[in-house]
Image (cartoon, rainbow, N blue to C red):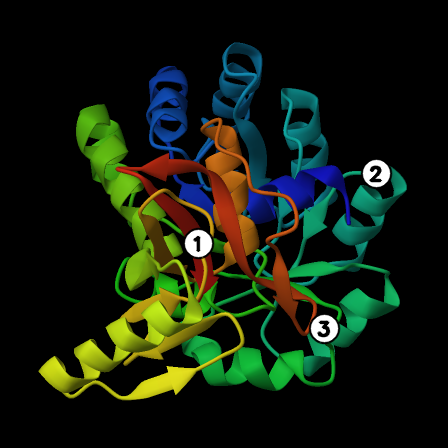
C-alpha cells in the first residue's frame, strides 16, 4: 500500500468537501489541520475544485489534498495538475483507474458489492471506497465483503456521521471513514472555521471512541494482590478472575501481583483501533513503550504509551 494511503489510514477520517469559492480553501484546510484531520477530499462537483486543490496544496504542505467525485480521465488530469495527491471516484471506471495506476497516483474507486471488489483486486488495488456505505448494506455488507477479500481495505462513505463512525472504525477492514458532516457546505460558505474545527475535533474523538476500560493497581506481592482483590469482591460483589500477572475484580479493576509500569498503577483506555490511536499520539509527540505490544489476528490489541498522568501509566486497549 502506498505511503499516502497508509497516511490516510493513520488519520482515519477523510472529510468530503464541496467548496464553491477557492478563496475559502486555505482557511478550511487550516481548520482541518488544527483539529487533527490533515486530509481533504475536494470533490469535483463545483468549478472551484481545481483552484481549491491548488491553493491547499501550495499553502498547506501538512495537509494531504485529494480530489473526489472524479468521473473522467480529464478530471483526474485536472486534479493532478492542481496538486491532488490521491483520486477518489464514486464508482468504477476502468479508464480513470488505469490512468492513475499508470502514473503512480493512489486511487480509491467506489464499489458497493463483490463485483467491484473483484475488479479492484484484478487491478492490484489494496484499498477501495465503499459507497454508498449505508445504502449498500452498511456494516453487514462490509463484513460480508471482508470474508472473501481479507486483504482489501475499505473507505466507507455515505450515510456516516458522528453517531455511527465508531462502529465502522472498529472494523479491521476499514482503512478510513469518509464523510461531510463536519465540513458542511453552508458552514464553508459562511466561513465558520471555528464551528468546522469543533465538529472536526468531535469527529476525531468519535472515530477513536476513547473510554476508560479499567484501573490498574500496583501491589507489591501476589499475596497482597489476592487480599486487595478479595476486599473488592467482598465490598461490591465483583466477580474475580485470576491471571498469571494480575487479578481482575470485575472488569473495572486490575490488581497487579507485582509492580508494573506507573508509580501508582495504570489506566487502560479502550479505543476502536490501537494502530490508528498510536499514530495520533505519535503526532502529538507521545510514543509507545517497546515490548508492551500485544497483537491478536494481526492487529495490535494493546500497548503502553510512554507518558504518565498523575503517576498512572497509560495503556491502550482495542475495543
Across and down, in percent, residue 213 comes to 32, 65
The structure residue drawn at horizontal position 24% and vertical position 29%, both measured from the top left corner, is: 189
Relative to 39, 269 lies left or right:
left
Q: Nearer the viewer, residue 16 or 319?
A: 319
Q: Quadrant of the C terminus?
A: bottom left
**Mark 3 touches mark 1? (CB < 8 Å):** no
Q: Residue furthest left?
A: 235
Q: Secondary structure at mark 2?
A: loop
Q: Nearer the viewer, residue 247 or 206?
A: 247
Q: Which residue is mark 3?
A: 117
How packed is label 3: few (under 14 Cα within 10 Å), some, or many (20 or more)?
many
Q: Which residue is mark 1?
A: 259
Relative to 241, 78 lies left or right:
right
How packed is label 1: few (under 14 Cα within 10 Å), some, or many (20 or more)?
some
Relative to 79, 307 lies left or right:
left
How packed is label 2: few (under 14 Cα within 10 Å), some, or many (20 or more)?
few
Q: In the rendered structure, find residue 104 and report the number of the disc placed on it.
A: 2
Amino acid at each position: 500500500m502506498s505511503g499516502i494511503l497508509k497516511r490516510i489510514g493513520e488519520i482515519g477520517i477523510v472529510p468530503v468537501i464541496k467548496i464553491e469559492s477557492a478563496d475559502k480553501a486555505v482557511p478550511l484546510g487550516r481548520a482541518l489541520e488544527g483539529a487533527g484531520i490533515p486530509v481533504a477530499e475536494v470533490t469535483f462537483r463545483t468549478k472551484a475544485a481545481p483552484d481549491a486543490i491548488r491553493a491547499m496544496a501550495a499553502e498547506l504542505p501538512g495537509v494531504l489534498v485529494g480530489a473526489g467525485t472524479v468521473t473522467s480521465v480529464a478530471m483526474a488530469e485536472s486534479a493532478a495538475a492542481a496538486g491532488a495527491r490521491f483520486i477518489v471516484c464514486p464508482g468504477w471506471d476502468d479508464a480513470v483507474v488505469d490512468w492513475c495506476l499508470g502514473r503512480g497516483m493512489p486511487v480509491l474507486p467506489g464499489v458497493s458489492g463483490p463485483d467491484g471488489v473483484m475488479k479492484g483486486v484484478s487491478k492490484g488495488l489494496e484499498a477501495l471506497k465503499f459507497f454508498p456505505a449505508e445504502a449498500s448494506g452498511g456494516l453487514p455488507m462490509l463484513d460480508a465483503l471482508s470474508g472473501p477479500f481479507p486483504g482489501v481495505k475499505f473507505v466507507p462513505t455515505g450515510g456516516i456521521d458522528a453517531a455511527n463512525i465508531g462502529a465502522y472504525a472498529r472494523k479491521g477492514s476499514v482503512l478510513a471513514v469518509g464523510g461531510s458532516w463536519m465540513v458542511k457546505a453552508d458552514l464553508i460558505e459562511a466561513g465558520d472555521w471555528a464551528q468546522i474545527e469543533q465538529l472536526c475535533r468531535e469527529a476525531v474523538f468519535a472515530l477513536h471512541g476513547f473510554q476508560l476500560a479499567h484501573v490498574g493497581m500496583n501491589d507489591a506481592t501476589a499475596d497482597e494482590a489476592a487480599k486487595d482483590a478479595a476486599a473488592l469482591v467482598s465490598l461490591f460483589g465483583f466477580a474475580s478472575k485470576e491471571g498469571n500477572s494480575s487479578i481482575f475484580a470485575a472488569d473495572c479493576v486490575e490488581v497487579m501481583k507485582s509492580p508494573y509500569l506507573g508509580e501508582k498503577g495504570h489506566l487502560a483506555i479502550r479505543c476502536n483501533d490501537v494502530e490508528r490511536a498510536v499514530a495520533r499520539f505519535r503526532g502529538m509527540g507521545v510514543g509507545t513503550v517497546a515490548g508492551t505490544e500485544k497483537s491478536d489476528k494481526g492487529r495490535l490489541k494493546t500497548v503502553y504509551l510512554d507518558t504518565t498522568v498523575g503517576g498512572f501509566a497509560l495503556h491502550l486497549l482495542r475495543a
